[in-house]
Image: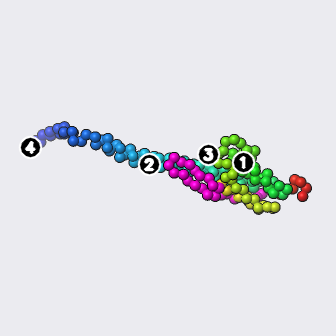
């Protein structure tokens, strides 16, 4: 007995019109949410990483600068803040991270003979399209002080 295979006849597709559009809408919504979430997280992670590197570089610079007893380390603090914000102890015009200012940087060098320098980025908010991430007192980096303590006015 030989079996004859008949081709499947074309079904009546009138009742299935628009199903592909509906399926596309569901899949696209899910994919859009997934891609947006990955972008938001990646952007926040990137900015936090830059903040952490800026604080680390500033703390390392501060640990090697001279601490002047005459001005209670104000010149050291200014240079460290500029390093954290602009990547240059002399200052600059474009911050390393959007909306970061020297007011967001806290430098702690307990004097008159500091043993360590702590640089903290405080009250910074990572602004994303759908969700903002507040970073109260983060990141914070401490480095052992290896500079010289001097007195420029002949204390």
* Residue at mark 4: 1
Point out the image quarter for the C terminus. bottom right
The circle drawn on residue 98 is 3
Query: Callout 1: few (<14), some (14-19), or many (20+) C-alpha neighbours within 10 Å?
Result: many
Mark 2–mark 4 Cα distance, whole angstroms, equals 56 Å
- Identify the secondary structure beneath mark 4: loop
Give the mark nearest the N terminus, 1 or 2.
2
Asked which secondary structure carries label 3, the reply is loop
Task: Choose the circle earlier in sequence order: 1 or 4.
Answer: 4
User: Which residue matches tag 1?
Assistant: 82
In percent of width and height, residue 44 lies at 55, 50
Mark 3 and mark 2 residues within 8 Å of each other at the beta carbon: no
**Colour scheme of the picture:** rainbow
Between the C-alphas of marks 3 and 1, the distance is 15 Å
Q: Considering the numbered disc 1 on the image, is that residue within a helix, a strand or a loop?
A: helix
Out of 27 and 131, give the one closest to the viewer.
Answer: 131
Q: Residues within 10 Å of mark 2 (few under 14, many from 20)?
A: few
Looking at marks 3 and 4 on the same chain, the residue that comes earlier in the sequence is marked by 4
Task: Kindly identify the residue that appears in the image at 32 percent across and 44 percent down.
Answer: 23
User: Residue 132: in sight, yes or no?
Assistant: yes
* 1 vs 4, front mark: 1
Query: Which stretch is magenta?
Result: 122-147
């Amino acid at each position: 007995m030989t079996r004859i295979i008949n081709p499947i006849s074309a079904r009546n597709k009138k009742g299935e019109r628009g199903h592909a559009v509906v399926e596309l809408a569901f899949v696209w919504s899910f994919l859009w949410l997934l891609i947006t979430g990955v972008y938001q997280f990646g952007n926040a992670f990137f900015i936090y990483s830059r903040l952490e590197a800026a604080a680390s570089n500033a703390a390392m610079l501060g640990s090697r600068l001279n601490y002047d007893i005459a001005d209670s380390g104000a010149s050291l603090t200014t240079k460290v803040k500029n390093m954290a914000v602009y990547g240059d102890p002399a200052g600059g015009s474009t911050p390393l991270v959007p909306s970061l200012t020297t007011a967001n940087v806290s430098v702690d060098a307990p004097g008159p003979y500091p043993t360590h320098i702590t640089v903290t980025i405080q009250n910074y908010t990572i602004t994303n399209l759908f969700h903002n991430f507040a970073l109260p007192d983060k990141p914070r980096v401490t480095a052992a002080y290896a500079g010289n303590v001097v007195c420029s006015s002949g204390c």
